[in-house]
Image: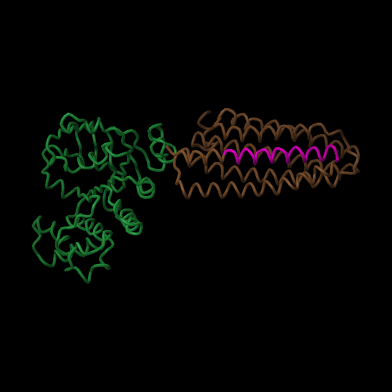
Chain colours: A brown, B green
Amino acid sequence: MRYRFDQELDKLNLELIKMGGLIENAIEYSAKALINRDLSLIRNVNELEIEIDDMEKTIESHCLKLLLQQQPVASDLRIISTALKMITDMERIGDNAEDIAEIAEYMVNQKFIKDLVHIPQMAEATISMVKRSVDAFVNKDKVLAEEVCAADDIVDNLFQVVKEELIEKIQENKENGEQAIDLIMIAKYLERIGDHAENIAEWVIFSITGEHAREYNGRLK
Amino acid sequence: MTDKIKIENVNLYYGEFQALKNINMNVKENEITAFIGPSGCGKSTLLKSLNRMNDLIEGVKITGRILLDDADIYGDMDATVLRRRVGMVFQKPNPFPMSIYENVAYGPKTHGVKSKAKLDEIVEKSLRSAAMWDEVKDRLKKNALSISGGQQQRLCIARAFSVNPEVILLDEPTSALDPISTMKIEDLLTEIKKDYTIVIVTHNMQQATRISDKTAFFLHGEAIEFDETEKLFSMPKNKKTEDYITGRFG
């Protein structure tokens, strides 16, 4: 038995859970910073983004060390290569959260042209996707990963709703244009976060089945 | 690619002990096939059955068929002819206590080659194929036991080439060698597979992943899984294979 290697894999799981927690917070704070016009939360997001970048480097070097020392094969190889791919998507989510916070900072003194209903829903949905995708990896839960992939449709639909509402607002009054564009960008960043979470879930499916999502889905049909 | 060797329902017994249990697999021409598994799993026994080296052990009984180009090697085939067509290289380099030249010329001589010019040609060609001609061309008369272990092993491979075989069996050929000599032999095998069919027993799984096209995993005399090497080491189908190759065996 490879106790030391298994311990290292457990440690890798903990690192990914930690990084997952950081990006969940980053999304939450960036959305709240926008809604509550809270400058301190914006600073939190900036700090989190640095921490997320550091975490990516830590996990990456941990994975490379395991590849070098353990020369893993089969499920071990898939787990480590999946972790390496996941952290790229996770780091991008951190970037997207920071992008949202940046726009929120710019909007901090503006009166909203509409009540923000769907953007908070998008934030909530993406946080849940991120959390579940990391849980699916740690627990090798294929069903949960599949649920995350399906949940991306919810985020995409919400993005469409936000887009249509903002088009209406511009049509009502062209003065709304500037803020509408800022809000659509925020919605787009959230939609991208959903895509990254879906990518993570697809890598989790690969780590469990050995097949890429497209092959896997093709075979299920 | 065609099947060079077909192994059909092979069972092998050492007295009462059954060392191979109903083995079925085909070895493709111009490919490297690796046999892996823990000690005592039957992989070397199967390798040795492919050129009837087990005939020399008392109390061995074998059932089923092993076909070389569709001819049953346990049927009418003469064992000497078989061993010329299917050469073997062992774990420990075992050059004869004679010169480098004589080591390579020995086989062709016993098969009736007398012409000095022809023998010279065979020796050069074989040593070139084993990627050691340049290293030893100026000291062919030197005793083979005086060269390094890695060179001795390549000399044994050259000796196997000298009788123009079709299949080369290697039983852990690099386990006693340093990493550089190991790499040279791995490169050599990858290079020569276009002209030969190669079967290698190895305890080094990274070696199997580096050089082989197909891998068979053996356990307790059974062939548990046989597949393309990349598939077997990335997504093994059998839990026992997964447990063995990931080191979680037993």
Q: Nearer the viewer, residue A214 or B142?
A: B142
Find residue A202 and report its image quarter. top right
- The residue under the point 31% across, 47% down is B32
Vertical relation: B186 (above or below) A158: below
- Is there any visible trace of residue A41 in the rendered image? yes
Left or right of residue A178, residue B140 in this image: left
How far across and how far down the image is residue A191, in percent?
Answer: 71, 38
How far across and how far down the image is residue B49, in percent?
Answer: 19, 40
- The residue under the point 20% across, 37% down is B66
**Residue bounds of the magenta highlight:** A13-37
Find residue A151 and report its image quarter. top right
How far across and how far down the image is residue B28, in percent?
Answer: 29, 43
Find residue A179 and report its image quarter. top right
- The residue under the point 89% across, 37% down is A113
Q: Nearer the viewer, residue B112 or A23?
A: A23
Left or right of residue A160, residue A215 in this image: left
A16 magenta-colored: yes
- Is there any visible trace of residue B68 in the rendered image? no
Q: Nearer the viewer, residue A47 or A122?
A: A47
